[in-house]
Structures are given as C-alpha cells and as structure tokens.
Image (cartoon, grey):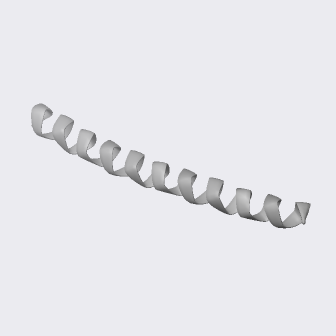
Amino acid sequence: MKNLFAIVGFIVTAKKALELYREYSVLKREKDQCSAKVQA
C-alpha cells in the first residue's frame, strides 16, 4: 500500500513539474521575442 501512495505522489508531482516547466518555456520564449524586437 505504501508503494501505491508513493507512485501516485510521484505521478502528481511529475505532472505539476512538467506543467510549470511548459509555462516557463512559453514565458521565456515570449520574453526572448520581445527583447529581439527591442534590439532590432
């Protein structure tokens, strides 16, 4: 039973981390585009 909880906890944590990483990537890309426009 402990292993089941560990697996579920790990999956939830991994999904949240992936979601945050994707959001960070999008924001970083937008920031890079804005700074490229300013420099141009």
Q: Is residue 10 left or right of residue 32?
A: right
Residue 18 or residue 33, whichever sits in front:
18
Numbered marks: total: 0
Residue in view at x 53 percent, y 56 percent: 18
**Residue drawn where x is 80% and y is 61% of the image:** 5
Placement of 35 over or under 18, stated as above or below: above
Residue at 72% x, 63% y is 8
Q: Assign the N terminus to one quadrant of the image.
A: bottom right
Q: Measured along the vertical axis of the image, is residue 11 above or below residue 13?
A: below
Relative to 9, is 13 on the left or the right?
left
Q: Check the picture and name the quadrant holding the C terminus.
A: top left
Residue lying at the far front of the rendered structure: 1
Asked whether 17 or 29 is in front, the reply is 17
Q: Quadrant of residue 7?
A: bottom right
Left or right of 29? Residue 37 is left
What residue is drawn where x is 47% and y is 48%?
Answer: 20
The foreground one among 16 and 36 is 16
Point out residue 21 in the picture as x, y percentages from the top left corner.
48, 50
Q: Position of residue 25 (x, y in %)?
A: 39, 50
Residue 17: percent from left, percent from top: 56, 51
